[in-house]
Structure formats: structure tokens, C-alpha cells
């Protein structure tokens, strides 16, 4: 049973470009979380999704950021018109039963905006 | 906003000593979870303690939960250099139908050989 897979591991984008981060949850998991982490800091909650539904996006900026978790395929975190301040590590986690069960994390995508 | 708050922010001990980290939270919870993160890597789940449990053990880890004080502690006994990592507590915050998992800022543990 493969773990949570995130790709790419590293992503470099120029200011103004779009960044697409992918997350394939563990088999049997229908709950996905996205977090952002700056160096030496904790994880900041961004969005919580279940299959085809956004449950809570209270941590996600209202502009330029969007997330989806389609019926088929990975969850996508999309950042449009990236700025230098978007540079961070983005982690995805999946769980079987939302916050009532343990979450499994991917290795993260390190986004660098130049 | 952050729900959990770990204390201390950083802890440095010698191999063989015990390490204790604390976590305080603000609202009612269904469970509290502890995770570990090695530098630059994804988080690894250590232990989950439910709101009706007071103590839980897993190997060299011992977690306590005091819901009246809204606090939890993680004890690592007989620490090893390989335990060097950041440790985070997480709570499942139930708001408006959402059960998002919210993390504290973490305790950075250094175990010196």
C-alpha cells in the first residue's frame, strides 16, 4: 500500500507563472488536507477536502489559490500568478476518517519562486 | 489560527535522558495527535489519544491528556540521537461540520550523543 505521493518534490516557478501541486492519497482514504510550512515554522492549515467537495478552505488565501479533489485522480493545489512570498514547502496529508483518525503525510513539494 | 501550542519551543538533552514536551489547546476536541518531523521531511504520526483517554503508551513514548486543563504531554524515555526532530501536536477542530486537523508550532528536540 503506497503512502501519500506528492509531486513534484521540487518546483521552481518565475513570478507570474502558475504552480500545480499534486497529491495522491493513500488507498482507501477520501480525506485530504493541504498545509504550508515555512523554514523553522509549524504547519499552517490551508484546505480540507473530501472527494469532490471542499469542506474547509478557511486557511487558503481567497485570491490566486484553489484546490480540488476530483472523483478520479489526485488532489491538486493550484497557485496562479505566483509571487516570491509563495515560496514554501507544501504538504499534503490523507486520512480515512477526517480528524477522527491519524493522518499520513507526503514528502512535500518545495516551491521556489524566482 | 493555531489551536495547539507546544512548549518548550526548543529542547536540548543528552542521550539517555527523558524528554518531555507539552501541548495546550483552546477548544473541545475529539482527539489529540502527536507527530514527528525530521528536517525537511513529511510528518510521521506517532500516537493518537482520544478525549476519553488519560494516558497512552507506545514503545518509549508516553502521552497524557488532561481535558480539564486542555493540555497534553509527550514523554520520550531513554532518548537516542535518532530522536532528534521536531514534534508537533495536532487537534481535530470541529467547526461548522469541518474536522480540520490543526497543528501547533512544534518543539524542536535535539538529543546530543
Image (tube, coloured by chain):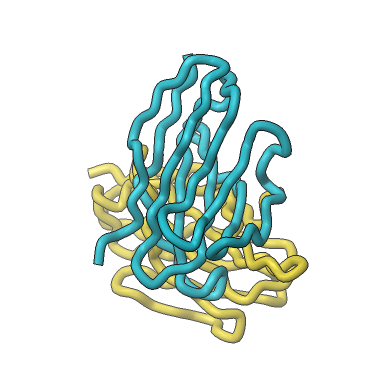
Chain colours: A cyan, B yellow
Q: Is residue A54 left or right of residue A6?
A: right
Q: Residue at x 49, y 54 (%)?
A: B88
Of residues A28 and B64, the one nearer the viewer is A28
Q: Is residue B19 visible?
A: no
Measured along the vertical axis of the image, is residue B62 above or below residue A109? below
Q: Is residue A19 left or right of residue B25?
A: left
Of residues A26 and B25, the one nearer the viewer is A26
Q: Residue at x 48, y 68 (%)?
A: A30
Q: Which image quarter: residue A102?
A: bottom left
Measured along the vertical axis of the image, is residue B2 above or below residue B60? above
Measured along the vertical axis of the image, is residue B28 above or below residue A84? below
Q: Is residue B42 visible?
A: yes
Of residues B63 and A24, the one nearer the viewer is A24
Q: Is residue B109 left or right of residue B7?
A: left
Q: Which image quarter: residue B50?
A: bottom right
The spot of residue B104 in percent (x, y) is 58, 51
Q: Residue furthest right?
A: B96
Q: Which image quarter: residue B18?
A: bottom left
Q: Residue furthest front?
A: A72
The spot of residue A111 in percent (x, y) is 44, 29
Measured along the vertical axis of the image, is residue B73 above or below residue A110? below
Q: What is the tally of numbered marks visible in this picture? A: 0
Q: Is residue B20 left or right of residue A56?
A: left
Q: Residue furthest bottom?
A: B52
The spot of residue B39 in percent (x, y) is 35, 39
The spot of residue A73 in percent (x, y) is 41, 55
**Quarter of the rendering occupied by the C terminus of chain B:** top left
Q: Residue at x 46, y 45 (%)?
A: A91
Q: Residue at x 61, y 80 (%)?
A: B51
Amino acid at each position: 500500500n503506497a503512502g501519500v505521493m506528492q509531486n513534484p518534490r521540487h518546483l521552481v516557478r518565475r513570478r507570474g507563472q502558475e504552480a500545480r501541486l499534486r497529491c495522491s492519497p493513500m488507498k482507501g482514504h477520501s480525506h485530504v488536507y493541504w498545509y504550508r510550512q515555512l523554514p523553522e515554522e509549524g504547519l499552517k492549515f490551508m484546505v480540507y477536502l473530501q472527494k469532490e467537495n471542499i469542506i474547509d478552505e478557511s486557511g487558503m488565501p481567497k485570491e490566486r489559490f484553489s484546490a480540488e479533489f476530483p472523483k478520479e485522480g489526485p488532489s491538486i493545489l493550484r497557485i496562479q500568478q505566483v509571487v516570491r512570498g509563495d515560496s514554501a514547502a507544501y504538504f499534503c496529508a490523507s486520512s480515512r476518517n477526517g480528524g477522527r483518525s491519524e493522518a499520513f503525510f507526503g514528502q512535500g513539494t518545495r516551491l521556489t519562486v524566482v | 489560527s493555531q489551536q495547539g501550542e507546544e512548549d518548550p519551543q526548543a529542547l536540548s538533552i543528552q542521550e539517555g535522558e527523558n524528554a518531555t514536551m507539552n501541548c495546550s489547546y483552546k477548544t473541545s476536541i475529539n482527539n489529540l495527535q502527536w507527530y514527528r518531523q525530521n528536517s525537511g521531511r513529511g510528518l510521521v504520526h506517532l500516537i493518537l489519544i482520544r478525549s476519553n483517554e488519560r494516558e497512552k503508551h507506545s514503545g518509549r513514548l508516553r502521552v497524557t491528556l488532561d481535558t480539564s486543563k486542555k493540555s497534553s504531554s509527550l514523554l520520550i524515555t531513554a532518548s537516542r540521537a535518532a530522536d532528534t526532530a521536531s514534534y508537533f501536536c495536532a487537534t481535530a477542530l470541529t467547526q461548522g461540520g469541518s474536522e480540520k486537523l490543526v497543528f501547533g508550532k512544534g518543539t524542536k528536540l535535539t538529543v546530543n550523543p
